[in-house]
Every structure is written in C-alpha cells, then in structure tokens.
Image: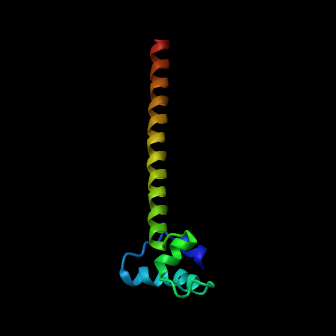
Amino acid sequence: MFAYLLSMTLIWWPYTVKDIEATEIVPRRFTKRLPKFSALPYTERLKRLNLLSLELRRLHANLICSYKILFIIIMHFISGSKAHKNTASKKTETN
C-alpha cells in the first residue's frame, strides 16, 4: 500500500488537511509499531529512521518530475534548433 501511495504522487496531490492526514496515517502507524519507537513523536521517529514524511516525498517527486519535463523540453528545443541550423546551412551550401 505504501509503495502504491508513493507511485500515485504525480497523479493525485492531496491538498486538503484531511487528505494529507489520511495518507500520513499509514507511515505513522507503521513507525509507531516498531520496537522502541512507540513512545516517540512521529517527527522524531522519522528522523531516527532517516525518512521523510509523505508530504515531503511528494514535493521531492514533483520537483524531480518538473525538472525532467523542463530539461526534456529544453533539450528538445536545443536539438530542434541545431537540426534547423544544419538544414539551413545545407540549403545555402547547395545554392
């Protein structure tokens, strides 16, 4: 279930407090059941386990996706302009 929630971050972005809390219940309950972690607050459990909250993971995943989209668009634009220059220079050479 946890992996499924993470995979859906780019499709479904919970923005209401109710939805965010509902998705955070899964890791909260899981980390609370670990030995020696039940008395610790959620943020401390995450720190000790070296984990990020689901909200921060969603933000991280969306930033990476945005970067990839932007990078692909820029690379497509650059490669397209180079291809355009190459065809233009070939036309002038033949004339």
Q: How is the image coloured?
A: rainbow
Picture coordinates of residue 19 (x, y %)? 42, 82
Q: The N terminus appears in which quarter of the rendering?
A: bottom right
Q: Residue at x 60, y 87 (%)?
A: 33
Image vertical order of residue 70 relative to residue 39, above or below? above
Image vertical order of residue 80 relative to residue 70, above or below? above
| Rendering quarter of residue 17 | bottom left
| Rendering quarter of residue 84 | top left
Residue at the right extreme?
A: 35
Picture coordinates of residue 85 (x, y %)? 45, 25
Picture mark count: 0
Q: Residue at x 50, y 84 (%)?
A: 25
Q: Residue at x 57, y 72 (%)?
A: 49
Between residue 74 and residue 56, name the one nearer to us: 56
2 sits to left or right of 56? right
Picture coordinates of residue 63 (x, y %)? 44, 58
Q: Residue at x 51, y 71 (%)?
A: 47
67 sits to left or right of 30? left
Image vertical order of residue 41 relative to residue 78, above or below? below
Picture coordinates of residue 51 (x, y %)? 54, 70
Residue at the left extreme?
A: 16
Between residue 66 and residue 77, name the one nearer to us: 66
